[in-house]
Image (cartoon, grey):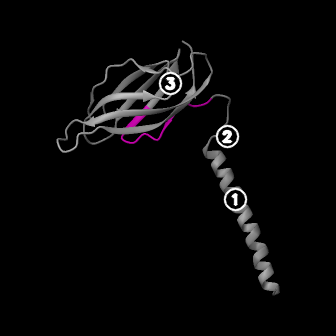
Amino acid sequence: MQKGQSTTEYLLVYVLAILVVAIALALLFYLGVFSAGSTRQNTATGFVGFGISQNCVNGTLNMTVTNTQTFPVEVTGINSTFPGAVNSSKLGILQTDQSQVFNLSNACPSKSSSKYSSYVIIIYNESSSDLYPGPYFSNGTISGMSAVS
C-alpha cells in the first residue's frame, strides 16, 4: 500500500464520521429535541392544501382549517387517531382563503399541561369539479400541550 493511499483512506473515514454526526444533529434539531423552554408549541405539519392552527382545551381539539387551494372544497370529514375522538362540528364548503373552526371532542388529553400528538385526516371533495370531485385526503400530524380553561 502506498503512503498517499493510506492517508486518503484515513481522511475519508474521518470525513464520513463527521458527516454522520452532522446529519444526526440536524435530525435532532429538526425533531425539537434541543428546543428551548419547557412548553411545547402547538404545531400542525404535513397538511397539503390547508392551513391549520390548533389548540387543546379541556380535551377538545379546536382546529382552525383554512382552505389554501385555488378552488372551493367541501369538507366531508375530519378523523383523528386519538382514541375516542369525535368531530362535533358542522362540515361544509370552504371557499378559497376561508377558515372554519372544527372541534374534535376527546381528541386530546383533558389534563392540563399534557403533551399530545395525533394523526389527523381531512376528507374533502372539490366542489367545483365535475370530472373527478373526490374524495381527496389531506393528512398530517398535530401536537402540542393541552390546557384547561
Look at the numbered discs 3 and 2 and tell me whether their residues touch, using CB distance below 8 Å: no
Residue 49 locus on image (x, y percent): 36, 41
Above-or-below relation of 3 to 97 = below
Q: Circle 3 sits in a helix, a strand or a loop, which is it?
A: strand
According to the picture, the residue beneath numbered tag 2 turns out to be 33
Of residue 112 and residue 105, the one placed in the foreground of this image is: 105
Mark 1: give few (<14), some (14-19) or many (20+) Cα within 10 Å: few
> Dot 1 corresponds to which residue?
20
What element does badge 2 sit on? Answer: loop
Residue furthest to the top in view is 149
Farthest-out residue, front: 83
- The residue lying toward the viewer, choosing from 47 and 68, is 47
Question: In the rendered view, does 83 fall on the left or right side of 86?
Answer: right
Residue 71: which quarter of the image? top left
Estimate the x, y position of residue 108 in percent, counting from the top left.
53, 22
Q: Nearer the viewer, mark 2 or mark 1?
A: 1
**Residue 41, magenta (yes or no):** yes
Q: On the image, numbered disc 3 is attached to which residue?
A: 55
Q: Quadrant of the N terminus?
A: bottom right
Which quadrant: the C terminus? Answer: top right
Query: Which of the two labelled residues, at mark 3 and mark 2, occupies the earlier sequence position?
Result: 2
11 above or below 62?
Answer: below
For the magenta stretch, what is the residue range?
40-52
Side of 127 relative to 8 (left or right): left
Q: Nearer the viewer, residue 87 or 4?
A: 87
- Above or below, 97 against 20 in this view is above
Residue 90 location, quadrant:
top left
